[in-house]
Image (cartoon, grey):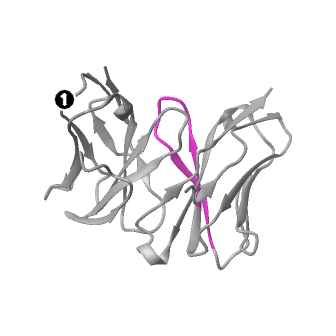
């Protein structure tokens, strides 16, 4: 158990809809990262927050947004969903930027 | 453009033998490298890392080698055990993004045959 929790575990929705994925980092970790893993693909870095502020951005679509709240949990919002958004979404946390990240179990999103 | 490449999607090794997983990177600004292991239905877990000031780092059965001039690193597992069967991701980051942005390779699926 990494100490990082993600909810929900599975999510099935329709095209055009909006969903919110939630992540609680390990106790004491200030950085939260979001990754997308599509079928047979590696982990694509989406975005990182550090203590409530956006720190780094990857290939995150404009339809996606994220935030980190004062209690350090984070949410990833995906809107106007398309079939191609079906993927595993992982959240990870770390004490600071460099070094090891601890990953949650992921949320599997299926868009029908 | 894939900045971190793992050209072998899969690898099969006999139990007790050495497993060698390879990784190449294109961005010369990367100076910190990590390996993660992932089992099905779980998130990746950190295995071992190496900074560009070293060319080797060892942790038990796992050793990572870095060849900066070739922009190549490899993970050696000796001896390989059936529990090592998993997907292995190579990852890289650099000071230009304060190490915040970690780029992962596509992964290599390792099967250790008993």
Q: Position of residue A40 (x, y in %)?
A: 55, 34
Q: Quadrant of the N terminus of chain B?
A: bottom right
Task: Please tell me whether residue A65 is drawn above or below residue B53 in the rendered image.
Answer: above
Q: Residue at x 25, y 50 (%)?
A: A62
For disc 1, the chain is: A
Along the line of sight, the residue nearer the viewer: A105 or B9: B9
**In the depicted view, which residue is nearer to us: B18 or B92?**
B92
Q: Is residue A73 visible?
A: no
Q: Position of residue B34 (x, y in %)?
A: 58, 59
Q: Is residue B100 left or right of residue B45?
A: left
In this rendering, would B100 be left or right of A23? right
Q: Position of residue A34 (x, y in %)?
A: 35, 50
Q: Which residues are magenta?
A: B34-51
On the image, which quarter does residue A95 sit in?
Answer: bottom left
Main secondary-structure element of the magenta-colored stretch: strand
Residue A88 colored magenta?
no
Asked if the magenta segment contains residue B41, the reply would be: yes
- Please report the residue visible at 43 percent of the width from the left and 64 percent of the height from the top: B101
B22 versus A19 height, above or below:
below
Q: Mark 1 = which residue?
A: A17
The picture places residue B108, in percent across and down from the top left corner, at 66, 42
> Circle 1 — which element?
loop
């Amino acid at each position: 158990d990494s100490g990082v929790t993600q909810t929900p575990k599975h999510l099935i929705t329709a095209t055009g809809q909006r969903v919110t994925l939630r992540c609680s980092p390990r106790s004491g970790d200030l950085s939260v990262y979001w990754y997308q893993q599509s079928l047979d693909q590696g982990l694509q870095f989406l975005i990182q927050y550090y203590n409530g502020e956006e720190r780094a951005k990857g290939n995150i679509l404009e339809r996606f947004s994220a935030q980190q709240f004062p209690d350090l949990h984070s949410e990833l919002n995906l809107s106007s969903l398309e079939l191609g958004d079906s993927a595993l979404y992982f959240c990870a946390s770390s004490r600071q930027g460099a070094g090891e990240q601890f990953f949650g179990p992921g949320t599997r999103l299926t868009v029908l | 453009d894939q900045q971190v490449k793992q050209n072998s999607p899969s690898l099969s090794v006999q139990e007790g033998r050495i497993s060698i997983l390879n990784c190449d990177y294109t961005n010369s600004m990367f100076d910190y490298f990590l390996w993660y292991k992932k089992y099905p239905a779980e998130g990746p877990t950190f295995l071992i890392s190496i900074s560009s000031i070293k060319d080797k780092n060892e942790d038990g059965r796992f050793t990572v080698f870095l060849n900066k001039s070739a922009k190549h690193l490899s993970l050696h597992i000796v001896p390989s055990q059936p529990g090592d069967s998993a997907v292995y991701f190579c990852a890289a980051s650099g000071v230009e993004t304060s190490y915040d942005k970690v780029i992962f390779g596509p992964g290599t699926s390792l099967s250790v045959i008993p």
